[in-house]
Every structure is written in C-alpha cells, then in structure tokens.
Image (cartoon, rainbow, N blue to C red):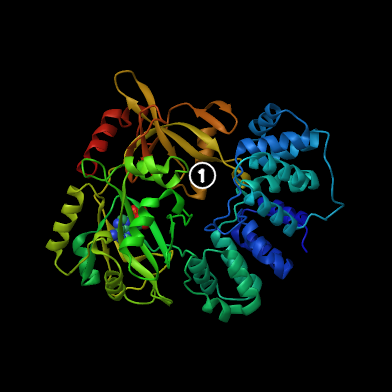
C-alpha cells in the first residue's frame, strides 16, 4: 500500500517544477512505486480524477458542501473558511489553514496510515450516497477523511474531492510518464488512452502486459472513446484538390454525442464523454426506435430546432445536456434531433479501422434515414459550394469535408476531417482586468478581462475573458506589462487601467447576461497585442452587434 502522504509529497514536488520533462520523470517514478492494486487509482488521482471521466460515478461535492465539511472538521464558522479561501485563492490551502487553526484535528491514523486506497474507497462511498440525507452523510465522510489526514495531505485531499488538483499534470505528462515508467512506446499509450479514456486502465495494462497488452486494447461498448476532430479547411478548392473526392456533410450547429446501444440499453455521452443519458430521454427513445442494430457505437451531432425551424443557440442545447430536473418540460421547450454521421462499432466488431465509405454503408444499413446526417460524395467544387450555402442558409455552421478513405482516428484533429466555416473577423478589445493564475502560475496573470467601447459614453463594456493563444513567454511578458497597470485587487481578480488593446479571435458571438455588453465570445483566443492601437481605436459595441447579426445569416 502507498500512503496518501506519499501522493501528497509528489504533488507538492510537482508544484515546484516548471519543466515538463522533470515533471514527467517524477510522475513516472511515482507510478513505478505504487502497488498493482493502487496503480489505476494513482494514475487517475495524479490528474485530479477519482473515477474515469466517463464513469457514472460522481462525487457530487460542490464548494458549499466542502466548506461545511472543513468548517465542521476545524470547528471554525463557514464564514471564516470562506475568508481563508478568499485570502489564499485556493480551497486546498484554505482548508489546510482552517484545519490547522481549528481545534478538532482528529488524527485517527498514526503516521503514514491513510493509504491511497483508503482515500479512494472513502470517495466511492461518498459517490454512492444519493437522495435524502446524502448531503449530511457526504459531509460526515469528508470530515472523517480530513480528520484522518495530516496538514500536508489536506491540500490535495480537498482539491481531489472537487477533482481539481491544479498541479499542472495534464494528459501529455501522464502519457509520457506511463511510457517511461513501464518502458512502452508513447504511441501505444496514446492509442490506448484514446480508445479507453482511462489512464488507470492504460497504466495497469502497460505494467502487467507491456506493449502487447496495450495493442490489444480495443473499442468496447459502454466505454466511450475519444471523438475524432476536424482541422480548419483552407478553402473548397484546396480541400477538394487535396482529397480528390470528398464526403460532404453539413456542419450542424449542435452538440456532439456518442451513442452506445447494447440490446435495449442506450447510453449517450457528451463531447467531454460524460454520461448525459438521463437528461436526454427523447434522444434515447429516438435511438431505440430508429437504430436497428443490436449493439452499436454511433457518432453524431444533436441539434435543437426552434419553432422557426432554425437551430437554437448552443447554450440552449447545453441546458438540455445539464438538466437534472423538469427534464420532460425542458425537452418540449428545447426539442433535440439526431444527425448521426459515423459508426465505430457494430455487433462485436470494431469499425474504426475501416474506411469512412464502408462505415457509412453500415451506418445506413442499421439506422433509419431520419436520424442520419445527409452525405454527398463528390469531386465537384460547385457541388460543395452549393451544399455549403444550403447549410448556412439553414442556420448551420458550414460543411465538413471528409476523406472517404480515411479511418476513424479517436481524439485526433487530423487532415481527414476538414471544417469549412465563414471566416470570423477579429475584434480589437481593451484589457480592463485579469486573474492571477493558479499553482505554478500563481505569479502570472492567467486570463484577461476584455471590453469594447460604448462610443457615446466612453464607457468600457466587458465582453469576455481570454486565456488561450498566449504563449508561456508572452504570459510572462504580459504579466510584467500589466503589473504596472493594476488599480485594485480582490482575491485573484485584478482591475487594470485600460491602456492595452488585444486583437482577439473567436468562434462566435453569443448573447450573454454575464457581461456588461450583453454579449460573450465563444472560444476567444489572443491573436495579437495591438501596441499600435490605443483605447480609442478599440472596437465599439456597435461593431459587436453588427458581427452578431451577420453570423450565419441570423
Ligand atoms: P469544431 O468544434 O469547430 O472543432 O468542429 C468540430 C465539431 O463539429 C464536431 O466535434 C461536431 O460536434 C461538430 N459537427 C457538426 N456536424 C458535423 C459532421 N457532419 N461531422 C463531424 N462533426 C460535426
């Protein structure tokens, strides 16, 4: 058995490392150290996951419940715990401080006795608690854990209980660490992960059966695999020239789903591979009546169609996916329709290594046409152009151009699927605030609050935050630049003097009550720091409105 303290020490060590190679070695060492029984758990814990992402098991611990548990363990009032969170900007450190300050540290275990497995089993118990009285019971179980842990363990125990470890260990590091620890190729680890979505299983297989074992990992029903992704197409002519013949489909404005059907059981996974079945009974019904196959894994897009017959906003679809109550009423308000475009498994046979053309044939054999995305195979650029225009006119995003001969490559954003969408313009926005980063990045600004101008009043109206598109080097440069512009700070949030303009790219403008402008940007990314522009040159709310209206011919 490995003590949880050892795990906490590893996390602490990693927090002090900035280079990914060194981080990988530390994780690899740790994976080698843990026992066989604990390896699966450890490989998930190190990424901040308690269960595989796709598992139905959920801890159901939110900040409120956590604060109560910390408050009870430390006998400090919840308000005091909240204050510690505000001061430290991290729930883990706040809990450590609270429990160290409070009186009732129980110390159930003597040194080193709380093992990784103890923690996991307790978490499983917590996940099993549902219904009436479950909140109190969850708090009691957390209290037990916190009471048993040493101060240095509390930080990571608490962060793990909300599945946010924040030590900077991502998929790439765990992949490389497994390869290093068990002397197998990174490609095989990667492949195993794309197929199973569970580094626990991949690590265990690598240790026990090596590369050969990893090769045997395959597609299995009720274990979602990562979805194949698309690259941006440079244009119709270029794409058709490159692929020769293309399979053209509408790029639907909806949300990705992966459907697993086993006899009469249907499970639907979201793009993040979370089980969303219980929120989508209408889709389940549709699958049961329109999919003839006994067992199959299907891939597609769920679209919400409004009364005007046009796709509803993405947020509306998300409301459906997240819904836990009043599901039937919401299903009437936001009706969903399936557009399936792929099949990855059929009656015991994996199809991911079959060409798209063959997969499509099977898909058509086992599904009713009404739930399929229409596909046209062509080498004619005008035909593609016509389908593209039709898709936009119908309120969808554009088209997907797929290589008919290509295999299904889970989790890969390759050249075999190209997305063609209208080019979105960029916005020049004023940076009015920021957020300090977390963990290793606590001394850097991690995201920036952006605003557009209201010309008549000269007010700056917030429109979103950008954290993507910033290189590590830039992160440091920008922090130095913005440090000089800080007006006020509260917790991790900082207000800046409005001096700097960012050119920001985005996928879409959405209406949003969360920002002063009434709009938000979907997937914003920093394109350039426009040192050549002053605040007066930044874009106005009118331009934002124009772009919003111009999107997809709304
Ligand atoms: P993006 O999210 O812009 O990278 O575009 C890829 C996404 O488009 C996929 O993850 C799907 O959710 C969505 N999509 C819509 N229609 C299709 C289609 N016909 N084939 C593949 N993906 C599609």
Q: Which residue is mark 1?
A: 475
Q: Is residue 499 above or below residue 125?
A: above
Residue occupying the point 24% across, 42% down: 551
41 left or right of 407?
right
As drawn, 528 above or below 418: above
Depth check: 237 or 205 in front?
A: 205
Residue with the most extreme left position:
382
Left or right, 21 with reference to 234? right
Residue 350, above or below 339:
below
**Residue drawn at 57 percent across, 27 percent down:** 489
Residue for point 62% across, 69% down: 203
Q: Nearer the viewer, residue 368 or 109?
A: 368
Where's residue 447, x and y in %? 49, 40
| Furthest residue in direction top, as rendered | 457
Can residue 234 be spotted in the picture?
A: no
Q: Position of residue 552 (x, y in %)?
A: 23, 44
């Amino acid at each position: 058995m490995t003590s949880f303290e050892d795990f906490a020490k590893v996390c602490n060590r990693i927090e002090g490392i900035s280079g990914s190679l060194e981080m990988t070695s530390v994780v690899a060492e740790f994976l080698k150290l843990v026992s066989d029984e604990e390896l699966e758990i450890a490989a998930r814990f190190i990424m901040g996951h308690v269960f595989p992402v796709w598992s139905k098991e959920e801890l159901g611990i939110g900040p409120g419940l956590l604060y109560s548990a910390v408050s009870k363990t430390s006998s400090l009032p919840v308000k005091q715990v909240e204050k510690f969170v505000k001061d430290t900007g991290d729930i883990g450190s706040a809990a450590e401080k609270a429990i160290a300050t409070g009186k009732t540290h129980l110390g159930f275990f003597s040194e080193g006795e709380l093992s990784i497995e103890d923690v996991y089993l307790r978490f499983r118990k917590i996940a099993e608690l549902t219904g009436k009285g479950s909140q109190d019971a969850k708090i009691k179980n957390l209290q037990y854990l916190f009471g048993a842990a040493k101060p240095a363990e509390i930080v990571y125990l608490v962060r793990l209980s909300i599945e946010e470890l924040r030590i900077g260990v991502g998929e790439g590091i765990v992949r490389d660490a497994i390869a290093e620890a068990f002397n197998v190729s990174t490609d095989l680890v990667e492949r195993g992960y794309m197929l199973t979505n569970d580094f626990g299983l991949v690590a265990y297989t690598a240790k026990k059966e090596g590369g050969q074992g990893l090769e045997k990992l395959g597609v299995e029903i009720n274990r979602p695999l990562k979805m194949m992704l698309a690259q941006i197409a440079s244009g119709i002519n270029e794409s058709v020239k490159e692929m020769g013949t293309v399979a053209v489909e509408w790029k639907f404005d909806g949300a990705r789903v992966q459907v697993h059907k086993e006899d009469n059981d249907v499970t639907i996974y979201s793009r993040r591979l979370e089980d969303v079945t219980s929120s989508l009974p209408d889709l389940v019904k549709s699958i049961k009546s329109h999919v003839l196959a006994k067992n199959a894994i299907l891939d597609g897009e769920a679209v919400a169609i409004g009364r005007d017959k046009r796709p509803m906003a993405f947020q509306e679809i998300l409301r459906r996916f997240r819904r836990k109550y009043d599901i039937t009423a919401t299903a009437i308000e936001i009706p969903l329709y399936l557009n399936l475009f792929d099949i990855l498994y059929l009656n015991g046979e994996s199809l991911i290594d079959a060409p798209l053309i063959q997969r499509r044939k099977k898909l058509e054999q086992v599904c009713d046409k009404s739930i399929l995305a229409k596909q046209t195979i062509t080498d004619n650029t005008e035909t593609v152009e016509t389908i593209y225009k039709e898709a936009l006119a119908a309120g969808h995003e554009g088209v997907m151009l797929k290589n008919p001969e290509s295999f299904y490559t889970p989790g890969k954003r390759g050249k075999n699927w190209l997305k063609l969408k209208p080019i979105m313009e960029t916005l020049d926005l004023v940076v009015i605030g920021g957020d300090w980063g977390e963990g290793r990045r606590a001394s850097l600004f991690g995201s920036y609050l952006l605003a557009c101008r209201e010309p008549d009043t000269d007010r700056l109206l917030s429109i979103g935050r950008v954290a993507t598109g910033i290189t590590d080097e830039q992160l440091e440069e920008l922090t130095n630049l913005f440090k000089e512009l800080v007006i006020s700070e509260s917790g991790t949030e900082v207000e800046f003097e409005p001096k700097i303009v960012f050119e920001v790219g985005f996928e879409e403008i959405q209406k949003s009550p969360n920002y002063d402008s009434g709009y938000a940007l979907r997937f914003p990314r920093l394109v350039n720091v426009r040192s050549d522009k002053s605040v007066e040159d930044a874009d106005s709310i009118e331009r934002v409105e124009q772009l919003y209206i111009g999107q997809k011919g709304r």
